[in-house]
Image: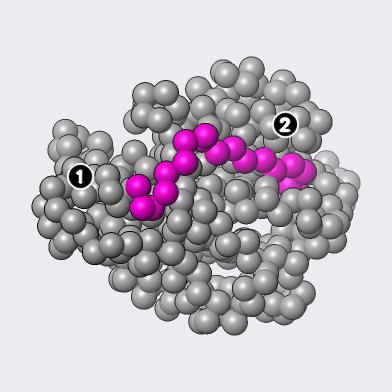
Amino acid sequence: MAGSPNHPPRVPAPRVGITAAAHVLPPTLLSTADLQARVEAASGFALPAGLLERITGIRERHVVVEGEQWASSLAIEAGRAALAMAGREPEEVDLLLFASATRDFVEPATAHVVNHALGAGAHCLDVTNACNSFLNGLDLARAMIETGRASTALVVTGETPSLSTRWAVDDVRHAAQHVAGYTFGDAGAAVVLEPVETGGFGRTETETHSEHWEVGGIFGGGSRYPRDYDKLYFTGAGRELKRVFEKIGPAILDSTLAHAGLEIDDLAAVLVHQVTTPYVDRFCEVTGVPRRLLDVTVETHGNVASATLPLQLSRQWDRLQPGDTTLLLGLGGGVSVMSTLWTKS
């Protein structure tokens, strides 16, 4: 039947890969010691010396200056760098996804700000799924290229979660409710996706457990709490989120590798979302992934939300060789876990 008028021949989907990755960091550096001092000054009482660095393992992070830098400005700078690395002009981009947990405003999509600043003129939209936003953006861009809806995609993120940090708290118990905010850092990142001859994306899997949507988040600014200022700070139960990840994270990693016919030793790198240093240690313990395969960014960058994985990819880009396979594993509030395999072309 192939080639008949009623049954045109099927065109195989193109192989899609990442051809460039870049990241940017705000120039302002904030140590955890200075962060704790700021909390104490705003709250009027002292926390145990070195408490926040001790429980998070984070020494410092880069943060934006409020009113001077935005989610879009980080994404724009990273987007320019990624396009230059790929040897592409903005006019060649026909799909631009701003895939980020934070954004400039509720409406319009921040993707339009980035699209206009780059001079891309691409079809653009925001992709938002907490800290899994960027992985979801990769998956959507890949699918649109495979189905012929796009040929060159730019996926960008601009994460500024430090702006949701609560500085003034009533007591230690109140501080514990907002401790996740004391882990945040800011970053921008971008990747270019195109058809490739070799390598590219492999197995992708997702797990979603929406019954945990109340575990943590920034609940203000939407229709439930449009003008509740207190809801604009990040709150969360970190221990519960950790338990959820320990329950479903190792399974999706094992399943992804098994379906691809791979072992952990076949991987050149494992890029995983990082919240605190103890989380990284626990990840290695429950999954069996050796620490040498990780790029531990949380100690010097903090939790940069969905920018975590592309930040690590950008840092590892020159080390990875053609044919090297990397596993990207994300965890996002809601709760969702997502994994994807990618081989450098």
Report the coloring of the rendering: one colour
Residue type indicated by callout 1: Ala
Write down the residue under mark 2: 83
Q: Name the side, left or right, on which 88 lies relative to 247.
A: right
Instruction: From the image, give the main secondary structure of the stretch colored magenta.
Output: strand
Check disc 1 and report its element: helix, strand or loop. helix
- Residue at the far front: name it: 49
Q: Is residue 261 above or below residue 71?
A: below
| Quarter where residue 255 is shown | bottom right
Q: Is residue 259 above or below residue 171?
A: below
Would you say 159 lies left or right of 289 here? Answer: left
| Segment tinted magenta in the rendering | 16-34
Residue named by callout 1? 41
Give the number of the mark in front: 2 or 1: 1
33 on left or right of 194: left
The spot of residue 63 in percent (x, y) is 44, 39
| Residue 3 image point, x, y percent | 88, 46
Q: Specify the amino acid type for callout 2.
A: Leu
Q: Position of residue 264 (x, y in %)?
A: 69, 77
Q: Quadrant of the N terminus?
A: bottom right
